[in-house]
Amino acid sequence: DAGVIQSPRHEVTEMGQEVTLRCKPISGHDYLFWYRQTMMRGLELLIYFNNNVPIDDSGMPEDRFSAKMPNASFSTLKIQPSEPRDSAVYFCASTPGLAGDEQYFGPGTRLTVT
Amino acid sequence: GDSVTQMEGPVTLSEEAFLTINCTYTATGYPSLFWYVQYPGEGLQLLLKATKADDKGSNKGFEATYRKETTSFHLEKGSVQVSDSAVYFCALGPLSSGSARQLTFGSGTQLTVLP
């Protein structure tokens, strides 16, 4: 298996622009997670899905952030409008779903908002 | 709520030194416990895990034992290498009886091993 795939790997955009990050989970995994990692705040869970349905979005920082999972093999995280404080590395992870299962992380998207 | 307290870094060691990174947790029930490692420019990857009390997880010379009496899961390695330089995260997993599936991560410990 190719593992969790994220695109793009790097994104540089100007403040106010829309940014869309993409994730393809491992086939057969029922759960998908979006995280944000910064030096100041560490690793934060933004939202997670079970069978394409959002289960917990309490970590989504503002209404500027939205996430969708239209099917089992694709998810997006959108920021509109973007701000410099959104600069971070965004990770997607997936897991089969049993309590003792590990999460498999993608390589991340490094977002820079200028 | 559930929480993980991890030894603050950064930690700098010489090659072949002994490593301990402390991790304690607060949780109800019997969660699974994990250690993840993040190499520069990469995502997190599982290093080892333990799913019940007294279990020992091990991988690549690293070990950690699930100690319920002390609510700890300390990471150890007898002889570190330069290639072990990375950030290490302790994480607490969901209860098998619950429906939630998110992990609770510690703040991470930066390890640098000098030749």
Image (cartoon, grey):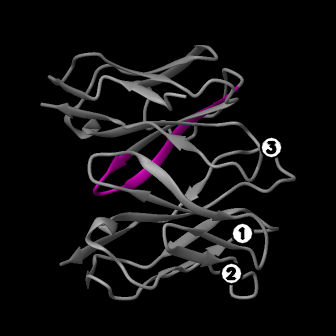
Chain under numbered label 3: B
Quick check: A34 left or right of B28?
left
Give SS at disc 1.
loop
For residue B79, the mark is none
Residue at 29 percent across and 67 percent down: it is: B85
Mark 2 neighbour density, 10 Å: few (under 14) some (14–19) many (20 or more): some
- Disc 2 residue type? Thr
Q: CA distance from mark 1 to mark 3?
A: 15 Å
Tell me where the magenta segment starts and ends, as one range. A37-50
Which chain's residue wears label 2?
B
Res B56 quadrant in image: bottom right
* Relative height, residue A11 to residue B19 (above, below): above
Residue B21 appears at what percent x and percent y? Answer: 45, 80
Q: Residues within 10 Å of mark 3 (few under 14, many from 20)?
A: few
Residue in view at x 54 percent, y 42 percent: A104
**What's under tag 3, amino acid-wise?**
Ser
Disc sitting over residue B27 in the figure: 1
- In the rendered structure, which amino acid carries the disc numbered 1? Ala
- Indicate which disc residue B99 carries: 3
Q: Report the residue marked by disc 2.
A: B71
Q: With B70 as the anchor, is A15 left or right in this view?
A: left
Residue A87 position in % (x across, y down): 24, 38
